[in-house]
Image (tube, rainbow, N blue to C red):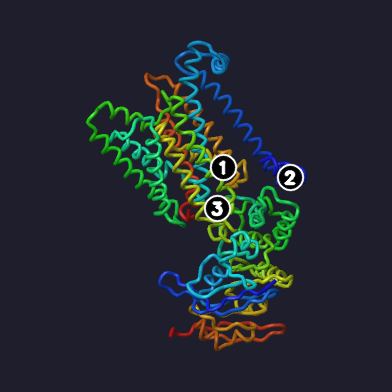
Amino acid sequence: MSALAARSLSVRLGRNQALSGIDLTLPPGRLTVVVGPNGAGKSTLLRTLAGLMAPSEGSATLGGVSIWTMRAAERARTIAYLPQGGQVAWPLSVASVVALGRLPHGEAPDALPPDGREAVAAAIAAVGLQGYEDRPATELSGGERARALLARALATRAPVLLVDEPIAALDPRHELVVLEVLKAHARAGALVVAIMHNLTLAARFADEIVLLDRGRLQAHDTPSAVLTEERLARSFGIAAHIAHETGGFVVVADRPLPQT
Amino acid sequence: MTLPFAVAIATGRNETAAMPSSRTLLVLTLLVVAAILGIASLAIGPAPISPVMAMKALVSDQGSASIVVRDIRLPRTLLSLLIGWIFGLIGAGLQGLLRNPLADTAVFGAPQAAALGAVIVLYFGLAGALSWALPIAAILGALVSIGLVVTVAGRSATVVVLVLAGLAVGSLAGAGTSLAISLSPNPFAVTEIVFWLLGSFEDRSMAHVGLAAPFVLIATLAILAAAPGLRALALGEETAKSLGIDVARLRLLIVGGAAIGTGASVAVAGSIGFVGLVAPHLIRPFVGYDPARTLVPAGLAGAVLLLAADCAVRLIPSNVEVKIGVLTAILGVPFFLWVIARRKAELSETPA
């Protein structure tokens, strides 16, 4: 497996310069968490890396191959992408939603071959939804649905997994469940990139943190190197302090700073 | 269709085995019902012919009975089946594309727009009622209306926007047709246009069948080609794209197929609505709500519904035959309202 790299990547959305000159190399086998204030360009970065959006300048490559010259099916097998706040339009069963993750392999959800079925079952088990296979996805709670959709992305078994706010709708226990799944996926060799707002959990689970602000890359390093009080003040506009705990640290946001 | 079934049976998994078998059963049931209705349709009419006689008259020369069955009843039976099939398929395709159970060509004003296209051709005497120009003009009309609604409503429009856009397009097309009628110098042409607008399979010949069939075939192929993509689209456009689906191509196939199917149908049978709205609803619970697996059964259900309606209009006692387009609207509109009432809460928020 090879690295995902962006070189002077810029994306323009209408008049808005969403990303400016991003240079980034993300190695496989690591969980990279992207943080940044609202509107920083996090989702745009993820969409661009997923090949869903073309940059106005620069390039993004996977193992040296441009993401936009890959064939759609090959890209879908290589890069799994989970958008933010996904919905399911029809009351499809959880099993058939997860089975959609096998489409890039040319496997119809109602006729999965043995390894496809195995991948679906493993993905459902990984997110703790065993016993929910036949439940209509539209009748799940927000957290259950979010996990079902994550299982869909996992079921593809792509070497790259890009997830946009996977824990936004989850309760504390399932936040940990999902982050452990992502971490384990990275440990198994996958290149995992997740957008998150919870800085403490980001610090605890991420191997690397990418800090974006106003479309620019502010920092890309280990959690303790990126999440400093000074950077939190500058990028997030908050007065925060870092409380060191055994085995990690906690980001305590104290108060918003006046807008500059 | 049979392979997944066999795989599911072989693996013995309850959940996957149950769904294909209920779908296969559904498809078989619909085919049997269509066959029974087909025979009934050959037997029903002013000239009393028994179903057995109708079958005989179809395959061998039985004098006047053969003429009635082959030249009068067979064309309308075939047209009902063809048009019902394509309407059911189009409804299921559009509902899958827009992720909205209220999508249908009738809601988008497509039949009115197709009718306007055809009326313009007829009005200016550009072509006779059996010319290829008629379906092509109707297809262009339908294409403009469906394309307009899908464009105006955009990718994440609510059902309200969708229906309002359809209403606007339908009203505009209706006004255009009214203008043509009111300006028409020939009262007989007016009667003819009005009657044709109401939608009917009366007095259609095999030439009409031949005119509609190629377009129905093209529309069928276009919509069925979009099936795998529709399934992925259930999770939204971005997810579908990330799963390798070409969403623009998918939209083109379904909008194009819907326009071709609607245009050709309107050109031969006038304006018949709501079959495409109702048919997929009846099917979905049997196919696990999978938009791809809804297509073929919805087409069959559409064929059965329209053929049943065409038998019904011949049985309703009245001086002149009730127009089938009137009957489908009388039955379809309350159904439409019922779906809205039942899903009010989610429809007010869910993007299409």
**Residue of label 3:** A89
The chain carrying label 3 is: A
Q: Read off the chain for label 1.
A: B
Image mark 2: chain: B
Give me the residue at 56% from left, 35% from top: B300
Classify A135 as above or below B335: below
Residue kind at label 2, given as amino acid type = Val
Asked if the residue at tag 3 contacts the one at tag 1, i.e. Cβ–Cβ closer than 8 Å, the answer is no
Quickly name the residue at label 2.
B7
Q: Where's residue B200, x and y in %? A: 41, 28
Q: Quadrant of the C terminus of chain A?
A: bottom left
Looking at the picture, tell me which residue is in the foreground, B216 or A234. Answer: B216
- Answer yes or no: is residue A39 visible: no
Q: Amino acid at mark 3?
A: Ala
Farthest bottom residue in view: A230
Res. B27 image quadrant: top right
Left or right: A79 in relation to B330: right
Up-down relation of residue A242 to residue A84 (above or below): below
Q: Secondary structure at mark 1?
A: helix
Dots 1 and 3 on the same chain: no
Distance, label 1 to label 3, CA atoms, is 16 Å
Total marks in image: 3
Q: In the image, what residue occupies the spot 41% across and 41% down?
A: B139
**Element on which disc 2 rests:** helix
Indicate the quadrant where residue B1 lies: top right
Judging by the rendered image, the residue that carries numbered circle 1 is B295
Q: Residues within 10 Å of mark 3 (few under 14, many from 20)?
A: many
Give the CA distance from mark 2 to mark 1. 21 Å
Q: Position of residue A13 (x, y in %)?
A: 45, 70
